[in-house]
Amino acid sequence: MPTATGVYIYGIVPADVETDPEAHGIGEESARVDVVRHGRIAALVTDVSLDRPLGTPDDLLGHEGLLDAVAAVVPVLPMRFGAVLTSREATVDELLAPHHDEFEAALRELEGLAQYLVSARYVRDTVLREVLTEDPDLRRRRDAIRDRPEEETHAERIALGERIGGAIDTRRDADAAKLADALEPVCTDLVRRAPTGEFDVAAIAVLAETARERELVRTVERLAHDWDGRIEVRLLGPVAPYDFTAEPQPEG
């Protein structure tokens, strides 16, 4: 019985895009990244075997890596990881043709722009020292249980942790606002993502003109210098503009 095949969709790009023969996305190293064109737009695709389950960490890295590489060169509307259609004809009929004009307009809006990610994280010892220094009551409570057995002070430790967490939350709100205020003048738009870690300050997606990338870099470098030893600030990008585009959806 012949192997069932499908077409894996990475994202939507302008029709004049040419793929690099060395470009690699998901699947085997020999899997080719191709372009399926319709009018003034196109889909970046790879032919895949439907007998092979998608979803490995390598597949996800391949998906994201290809889109990030493309986004550094041309506008791209990224598809969600795992999007597969039955054929190249279906890619045109169910995805490109029904949404041609809206995809083209969205790509035009991204011309000359790129997404970057700015993350900030507290230096753990520094922020804890700040909290305890500024609140004598917290410091006394910490000192009172420091050398006592954990099983004896379990409830007190939980209460202390909640108080410290609340104090860090207050700092986080203020510092995240300062970060966003510093980035706004050098970007077109920004999206503040919810912090995921206990000592995360902020994760901000920034849409900026590629011509102003150096300004963005200098802004992040200045923040990193000003917050040295207290908050670690990092810049990643350009990356695919997941935060500033609606995910393309096939018809059906």
Image: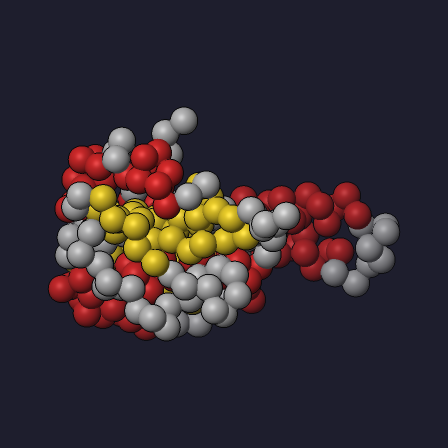
Could you tell me residue 52's position as x and y percent?
60, 53
Residue 73's image quarter?
bottom left
In this orientation, which residue lies closer to the viewer: 199 or 210?
210
Could you tell me residue 247's position as x and y percent?
35, 39
Which residue corresponds to the image point at 54% horizontal and 52% vertical from the top-left? 49
Could you tell me residue 2's position as x and y percent?
59, 50
Which residue corresponds to the image point at 44% horizontal and 49% vertical from the top-left? 8
Colour scheme shown: secondary structure
The vertical placement of 29 against 27, above or below, is below
Which residue corresponds to the image point at 41% horizontal and 63% vertical from the top-left? 32
Residue 234's image quarter?
bottom left
In this orientation, which residue lies closer to the viewer: 34 or 167?
34
> In this view, which residue lies farthest toward the top?
252
Could you tell me residue 220's position as x and y percent?
29, 66
33 vs 157, left or right, is: left
Look at the image and tell me whether residue 42 can be seen: yes
Look at the image and tell me whether residue 230 can be seen: no
Question: Which part of the image, by quadrant, shows the C terminus?
Answer: top left
Figure label count? 0
Which residue corresponds to the image point at 25% horizontal and 35% vertical from the top-left? 97
The vertical placement of 73 against 53, above or below, is below
209 vs 33, left or right, is: left
The vertical placement of 56 against 107, above or below, is below
